[in-house]
Image (cartoon, coloured by chain):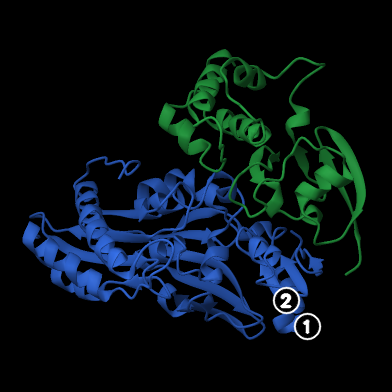
Chain colours: A green, B blue
Amino acid sequence: MSKREVTVTVNGKEYRREVEPRMLLVDFLRDSAGLTGTHVGCDTSNCGACTVLMEGRSIKSCTFLAVAADGRDIMTIEGLAQDGDLHPIQKAFWENHGLQCGYCTPGMILSTVYLLSKNPNPTESQIRRGIAGNVCRCTGYQGIVNSIQSAAKTK
Amino acid sequence: MYPEKFDYFCPDTLEGVIELLTQYGDDAKIMAGGQSLIPLMKLRLASPKYVIDLDKLQNLSGISEQGGEIVIGAMTRYVELAESELVKSKLRLLHDAVNVVADVQVRNLGTVAGSLAHADPGGDLAPALLALNAQVDSVSSSGNRTQSVSDLLVDAYLSSLKGDEVITGIRVPIPPEGSGGTYLKFERRAGDFAVASVGVQLTLDKNGGCAEIAISMGAVGVTALRAAKAEGLLRGQAVSDDLLKEAASAASAETDPFSDIRGSEEYKRHLVGVLLRRAFDIASRRAGGEEVSTAHV
């Protein structure tokens, strides 16, 4: 049950850490790398608040082992804004009331990054299917769908 | 939530995996995507001492057409199947099924063989592959073997795989010309397990009658089930509305569901009949060459 040394690249920066095999990626990001933008919501693989990108694909970081992320490339919400300028998707969420309490927002935005990387011009139903793994308890989703449609136009 | 402590291995050869399984026996658990295993470990419903991750077995990943079959590597992720034009054009039923598994994030990691080996009664891959007469290839210290999906599925969460046995791939016969299929899943909310699901794969004769048919049902028994009586009623027949209703009743009677948070036993039986009629209609139209979407069924 010994600790393992892993090197995980997060938002372009390498983090070399000793981890227990049972450490989850979300805890590695928050507690080990100090990147608290990725949220723990349900912690049972249902809500999508912990969504990050691994090698460009959206995954739930509460359902992935940090030790299995060794050598991999992760993107979190902290990696989106460049030099203080919001990413176009962040801007679209801001301008279209895509959030209220903000708890689901990092995961929602990373799911949007993945969705638009696969399908730059999604229909409304494709958007709703694309964010089906992300739960929002405030907005009723309409503001989020509007934000994603707006982001798709401006990208 | 943290799992119990365990040791982690990520071998890069199949031989290495079998060696570890032989060494650690029942204390070891294979991880093939982890989208069922990790939640179970976090809830401490499973506490293996050793986790053997198949992630580095790249040669177990991929989809190809070989001699009348679609061959799917054990570590192929749902997303790869969902995006495969080969699967969409030749195995539409499987395409439908992988697109309704959980949600985007789970489909980006979860694997077909992981789902089969986990043998969750509510899983979508087992009923889909059951209707398609798929064969499952595996390897263990005593050699290779091939078995049908129904032989693989023994009971709820129990497969016929031995302690040191690993699924290496799944082979699906390509249905003949004039065939169509679909997989319909009814869920309470986006991303949930099925309340009930039905897969229909059929072949029409030249008069539009039902020459061959396979019907499978998910989440209504301890394993995915075939509706053999309903198949028998429809096979070789020009199917009328009345006959389809009769087959739907037969399929309902062939289920063995239990009441739970997703619905009562009675409701699930009823639902199977409804889904069968819808699925038969879609599969028939697809067999006739019509493009039919299942996005809002």
Q: Which residue is mark 1?
A: B23
- Quarter of the image holding residue B216? bottom left
Mark 1 in CB contact with mark 2 (< 8 angstroms): yes
Q: Which residue is mark 2?
A: B28
Q: Earlier in the sequence, mark 1 or mark 2?
A: 1
Q: Residue at x 57, y 40 (%)?
A: A134
Type of residue at label 1?
Answer: Gln
Question: Relative to B110, is B275 on the left or the right?
Answer: left
> Which quarter shows the N terminus of chain B?
bottom right
User: Residue A7 or B136: which is nearer the viewer?
Assistant: A7
Q: Is residue A91 visible?
A: yes
Q: Residue at x 49, y 65 (%)?
A: B170
Q: Categorize mark 2 by other alpha carbons within 10 Å: few (<14), some (14-19), many (20+).
A: many
Height in image: B67 above or below A32? Answer: below
> Which quarter shows the C terminus of chain B?
top left
Q: Categorize mark 1 by other alpha carbons within 10 Å: few (<14), some (14-19), many (20+).
A: few
Height in image: A140 above or below B121? Answer: above
Instruction: Locate residue A71, reporting x and y percent.
Output: 82, 47
Height in image: A132 above or below B58? Answer: above
Instruction: Locate residue B168, reporting x and y percent.
Output: 58, 68
Q: Chain of mark 1?
A: B
Type of residue at label 2?
Answer: Ala
- Tag 1 and tag 2 share a subunit: yes
Q: Chain of mark 2?
A: B
In the displayed orientation, state which residue is furthest to the bottom: B142
Q: Secondary structure at mark 1?
A: helix
